[in-house]
Amino acid sequence: MTALYWLPSWVVLIVAVGIAVAVACGGQLLVHRFVADSKFLDDNDLNGYISGTIVTLFAVLIGFVTVVVWQQYDSMRDRVAVEASDVAGVWHDAVGLDPRARSAVRRDMLGYVNLMIHDEWPEMRSGGSSPKGAAYIMDATTVVGGMNAKTNAESNAQVTIVGLLNGLHAEREQRLEANQSPAVSGFMWAIMLFGSLAVVVFCYMFGASHRGTHLVMTGLVAGVITSMLILTFELQYPFRGDLGISPTVWVGLLDHIRDMDEHGVPAMRM
């Protein structure tokens, strides 16, 4: 399934919808080939009542899952912004450290940002990560934690940066965990697929005077359900596929750091 995240989302959607519509309409043609439409017409009222109940329950399920998946996706996008903000905070607050520690910490943060853009984000598309990320954080923590502050300014910067680095480590771990654990479990997928099958099959249970119209309705139902399932599939891992969270925030931070290093006051340079 991981390989599907390397395909363009629109390709996955079109292929999945095409297959679902073909199978749903083919199934309807097969059923109505052996059972006359007139036999379904007499039961349309009963079928409508039962299918209405099932469709309502299925809609509640799909709505619930969609909200859960979207909330995780939105939450992780915010967490990435906080992670980048922690890195920016460390880089800026390093101005209060002694020159040796300042250069070392800023070098680590610059390396971390470049790592996110060029290594870790591509790795996360397949569920992986770069071990160098933790190494950059630990190296900066070791430098700051081992520094012998000689002034109040250095002591304050030391405490602040250690706190930011701890937060950075926690945000990164939560990001990697979210990319390993899908928002939708296999059990939930099984229930949604069963519900999808039930809704489509109930479309077969109705009689219609115009078979072409009936096929179009069944195809639309299958297409809409499949579209919702594909959306859930694409969003259940926030950092995979075309819809995955991009490293845009890291690119912006890298530009900011370079601008400060080239044009900022001397204390803000590497």
Image (tube, rainbow, N blue to C red):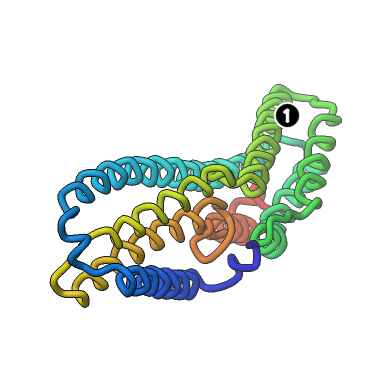
Q: Position of residue 88 (x, y in %)?
A: 60, 45
Q: Residues within 10 Å of mark 1 (few under 14, many from 20)?
A: many
Q: Is residue 175 above or below residue 115?
A: above
Residue nearest the observer in this picture, 58 or 80: 58
Identify the image quadrant of residue 24. Answer: bottom left
| Residue type (three-letter) at the residue carrying disc 1 | Gln
Would residue 197 be found to the left or right of residue 244 on screen? left
Identify the image quadrant of residue 226. Answer: bottom left
Q: Which residue does the image show at 38% across and 52% down from the upper left? A: 198
Q: Which residue does the image show at 75% across and 24% down from the upper left? A: 151
Q: Is residue 118 above or below residue 177?
A: below
Residue at numbered disc 1: 158
Residue nearest the observer in this picture, 216 or 173: 216
Q: Position of residue 121 (x, y in %)?
A: 65, 59
Q: Which residue does the image show at 53% across and 51% down from the upper left? A: 236
Q: Secondary structure at mark 1?
A: helix
Residue found farthest to the top: 152
Q: Position of residue 186 (x, y in %)?
A: 59, 46
Looking at the rendered image, the quarter that the N terminus falls into is bottom right
Residue nearest the observer in this picture, 128 or 88: 128
Identify the image quadrant of residue 118. Answer: bottom right
Label tally: 1
Q: Which residue does the image show at 46% across and 70% down from the upper left? A: 16
Residue nearest the observer in this picture, 249 or 58: 58
Q: Position of residue 214 (x, y in %)?
A: 22, 69
